[in-house]
Amino acid sequence: MPVTKDHPKPPRKSSMRKLIVLMQVTLDGRISHADGGFWQPFAWGEEETAYVNEAYARADTLAVSRRLYEVVVPYWEQVAAGTLPDAEVLESPASVEFARLLSGMRKVVLSHTLEDDPNTRREVRRGDAVAHLAQLKNQDGTDIIACFGPETLGPLADAPGLIDEYFLIIHPAALASGPRLFDHITHDLGFTLDSARIFDSGAAMMRYSVLNAPPKERS
């Protein structure tokens, strides 16, 4: 059975929807190999997918960089349509549910090359990513799940108050090379642990709220 440690969350300071960065990382903070491939062991299964589905079920929008969009979204759209020739995925209830949730979300893609696609609810934004995400947060709706590599994330993480939470899925692996999630931040960040869940596979799912000011040093 997974070990769960939950902490009560502080009250929301406003009715503004939350922007939640959700990413999978290794123990040394990398999001992929240098060539973009994933690592092994990749600790993932039905329980882990079902837990992540809970976060997606509370959101109505996916904000994503172009590269991650192209790697992730078309694959799961095939799963949702039942056209992916992978029986193992199609026979996984949690994976099918994830595909259904993702397919139904509004997808805001930061890109200079893609175009809007109403059929898949894809909306492309160019230019100032911080301004686009701030505008998105001020619109009506539920939570926003965000998936960004380090170059896109850096300026967003540096913008005070823009990102509300980091949902990090930490895998039991370390890589000799590859991009790290926080490679492009320019100042220190402080977090408060909201919850932690450890799975038998070795995956640790950590949810952190972002502190608006650096934590005070202990006396």
Image: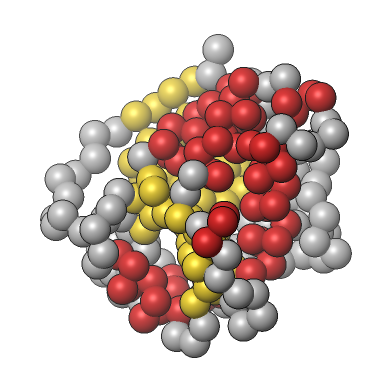
Q: Residue at x 39, y 27 (%)?
A: 5
Residue at the limit of the structure toward the bottom, as seen here: 127
Judging from the image, the colouring scheme is secondary structure
Is 31 displayed left or right of 14 in the figure?
Answer: right
How many marks are shown on the rendered structure?
A: 0
Visible in this render: residue 209?
no
Q: Where does the image place residue 187, in percent across and percent down from the top left?
A: 44, 78
Residue at the limit of the structure toward the top, as seen here: 1
Q: Where does the image place residue 157, in percent across and percent down from the top left?
A: 43, 71
Is 164 displayed left or right of 151 in the figure?
Answer: left
Res 81 → quadrant: top right
Between 191 and 99, the one lying in front of the other is: 99
Is 216 displayed left or right of 168 in the figure?
Answer: left
Between 155 and 129, the one lying in front of the other is: 129
Between 175 and 120, the one lying in front of the other is: 120
Q: Where does the image place residue 213, in percent across and percent down from the top left?
A: 26, 69
* Quadrant (top left/top right/bottom left/bottom right) for the C terminus: bottom left
Residue at the limit of the structure toward the front, as seen here: 119
Relative to 94, is 156 above or below?
below
Relative to 30, is 26 above or below?
above
Q: Residue at x 57, y 65 (%)?
A: 117
Is 127 displayed left or right of 17 in the figure?
Answer: right
Relative to 85, is 146 above or below?
below
* Quadrant (top left/top right/bottom left/bottom right) for the N terminus: top right
Visible in this render: residue 69?
yes
Q: Residue at x 60, y 43 (%)?
A: 170
Q: Residue at x 17, y 50 (%)?
A: 12
Q: Where does the image place residue 167, in percent across and percent down from the top left?
A: 47, 47
